[in-house]
Each structure stands twice: as structure tokens, then as C-alpha cells.
Amino acid sequence: GGVSGGVSGNVNGGPWVEDGGGGSHQQSTQHHQQPYHQYPPPPPPSLPPPPPPPPPTSIMAPTPKIIICGGVCLEKGPARKLLTHLAPDPKNLLAFLDRAENGTLAHQIQSLPYMGVADEVRIQVLMGRRQELSAAEVEEVDRRREEVVKWATRVGRGQGLSGKERRLSGKERRGMERRQGK
């Protein structure tokens, strides 16, 4: 009676498996079941494995920070709590986008340099984006600029204006002279 070692019967689909080419081969005794689909697919063998992701950094880490603040968002909520935690550290730079109203937290912080508590540093931030222009667009801009310069030159000499426009410009000129006391 009994079975003495080896593969017998119908184990995991039987000891024989079709290889798709019409032939068949015997499974090894070390059978590893793999899912039908693997997500994500394994990387090609020629590529090295991707590096591990960097460790997450915390906003509370003891490193200098540049904190860009809008006055209104500091009046309540998590932004206020975070700022009250980060503002006292002298290594942090607070950059305010606008001048805050009296009685607000942002106004209190902005007033610290005037009270001798902190140093004030004014920085100029320029933001813009680069826009590619075709030669035709550049020529159009130059043509319009030349037209405006010619028109302004004629207007400055009093030429090219209708009678009504000349009278209006004259009235405006006389009004300005009266206001200046001439």
C-alpha cells in the first residue's frame, strides 16, 4: 500500500506541465507557485535596481528654512501653529508676501526688527517665465513699438490730433498750470 517518496498522483496540476511548444517536461520537486500576473513587472536584468527612496524629512528637522508667509493665512489653523513654532529660530528666514494689517500675528512678527528684537533683511524676488518668440513675433513687436514712438512724437508736437483732441489736451494743460500756480 502506501506511497514511498517522490511525486505521485495529481499534485498542483500533476507532475507534467505543458511548455507551450507542444512538448512537455517534468516539474522539479522544488515547486514555487507564482501569481498569474505580477505587479509591477520585474525590471529587465540589464538594469540595476532603483536606489532606495531617501528618508523622509520632517518640517521640524533642525535645519535652516526659508518660510514664505502670506499675512492672511497666519491668523488661524495649522499655518499659525507651524509659524509660531518655526519663527523663533534665528536660522530660519521669514519672507512675507505682503504688509500685514495691525493686530495680526504677521504684523507682530514684521514689527520685530523695528523693536530691536530681530534683524530685518529685505530681499528682492523676481519671478517670471521664459517665453520663446518667433522672428515674426519679434518683428511685430518692433513694428508696434516704432508706431507708438512716432505717434507719441507727433502728439508731443501737437500734430496728428483732431481739433477736439487739441482742445482737450489744451484744457488739461491749462488746468495743470493753474494747480501748479503758474
Image (cartoon, rainbow, N blue to C red):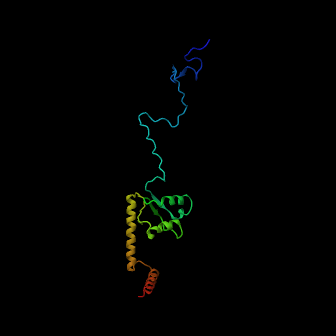
112 relative to 67, above or below:
below
Q: Residue furthest right?
A: 1
Q: Residue furthest bottom?
A: 182
Tally of numbered tags: 0
Q: Where residue 148 appears, x then y in whole percent?
A: 40, 71
Q: Residue furthest front?
A: 117
158 relative to 6, above or below:
below
The quarter of the picture where the N terminus appears is top right
Quadrant of the rendered image containing residue 143 = bottom left
Q: Where residue 4 appears, x then y in whole percent?
A: 57, 14
85 relative to 40, above or below:
below
At 37% across and 62% down in the image, what residue appears?
139
Viewed as shown, does residue 140 lie left or right of 18?
Answer: left
Q: Where residue 177 appears, x then y in whole percent?
A: 42, 85
| Residue nearest the viewer, comparing 84 with 177 | 84
| Residue nearest the viewer, comparing 90 with 122 | 90
17 relative to 2, above or below:
below
| Residue nearest the viewer, comparing 129 with 136 | 129
The quarter of the picture where the C terminus appears is bottom left
Q: Where residue 62 appears, x then y in whole percent?
A: 45, 53
At 54% across and 22% down in the image, what residue appears?
17
